[in-house]
Image (spheres, helix red, strand yellow):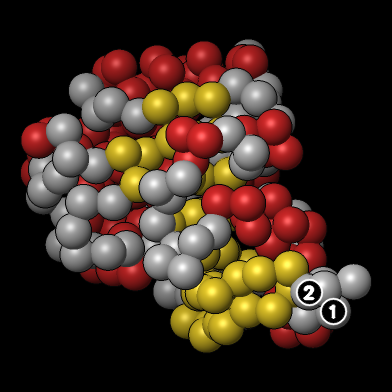
């Protein structure tokens, strides 16, 4: 999926497209200095990274939300989603997106992009295990992650953020069914899988009611 196909498929407005253009330009400027994405995927930036992130947009609440994006890296999916929701919620100060990224250089990149596109996000430069226990996360209603860890580890990172009203949106690959089976030994949770629009073998795992199993 190229830029034009993404804009058409996700019905992206001109303002949002301009913000994504700035994001892409900044990433390409920083990429030679910081390995933000795999060099093999630079030519597939719009399909492999932007579109892959954008497909979570329709699964977010139809109301202002507080999202925690775990292991944000170059901002996929959290910063893409913040940009896509900006016209509806963030520009009015109603949307809260927190990007959790332990790498100082990647966090600096996230700050630069958010400044350039004028979309406010909170950037926490610490390990997920630390921030998962902070009181500021008590109101999280959406947790997102992409290419972060196998499901049992990912759910371990996510569970401190969860309440009965929280939904997890996790982009996973071909091994997702085996990963879920393994995760069920450690956690009780409800889930459904949504086919990826960017990868025929990919799935979005939508997780609710996540709690650790008693040991």
Sequence-first tag of 2 and 1: 1
Q: Kindly identify which numbered label has been placed on residue 213.
A: 2
Which one is in front in this view, the residue at disc 2 or the one at disc 1?
2
Q: Residue at x 47, y 69 (%)?
A: 164
Classify residue 8 as left or right of residue 178: left
* Residue 114 drawn above or below residue 1: above
Task: Give above or below for 90 relative to 28.
Answer: below
Quarter of the figure with the C terminus: bottom right
Q: CA distance from mark 2 to mark 1?
A: 8 Å
What residue is at 58 percent from the left and 34 percent from the top?
Answer: 134
- The residue labelled by disc 1 is 185
Which quadrant of the view contains residue 112?
Answer: top left
- Where residue 84 sits: x, y (%)? 24, 48
Where the N terminus falls, by quadrant? bottom left
Q: Position of residue 147 (x, y in %)?
A: 66, 54
How far from the left and from the top, in percent, is residue 180?
74, 79
Q: Using the image as rendered, state which of residue 89 and residue 171 is in the foreground.
A: 89
């Amino acid at each position: 999926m190229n830029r034009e196909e993404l804009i058409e498929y996700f019905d992206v407005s001109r303002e949002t497209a301009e913000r994504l253009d700035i994001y892409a330009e900044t990433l390409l400027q920083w990429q030679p200095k910081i390995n933000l994405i795999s060099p093999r995927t630079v030519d597939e930036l719009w399909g492999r990274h932007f579109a892959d992130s954008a497909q979570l947009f329709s699964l977010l609440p139809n109301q202002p939300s507080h999202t925690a994006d775990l292991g944000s890296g170059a901002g996929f999916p959290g910063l893409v989603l913040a940009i896509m929701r900006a016209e509806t919620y963030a520009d009015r100060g109603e949307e809260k997106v927190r990007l959790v990224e332990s790498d100082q250089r990647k966090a600096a990149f996230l700050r630069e992009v958010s400044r350039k596109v004028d979309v406010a996000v909170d950037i926490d430069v610490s390990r997920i295990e630390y921030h998962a226990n902070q009181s500021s996360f008590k109101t999280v209603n959406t947790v997102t992650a992409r290419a972060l860890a196998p499901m049992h580890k990912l759910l371990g990172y996510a569970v401190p953020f969860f309440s009965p009203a929280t939904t997890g949106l996790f982009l996973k690959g071909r091994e997702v069914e085996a990963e879920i089976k393994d995760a069920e030994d450690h956690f009780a949770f409800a889930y459904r899988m949504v086919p990826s629009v960017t990868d025929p073998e990919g799935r979005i795992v939508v997780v609710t009611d996540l709690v650790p199993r008693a040991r």
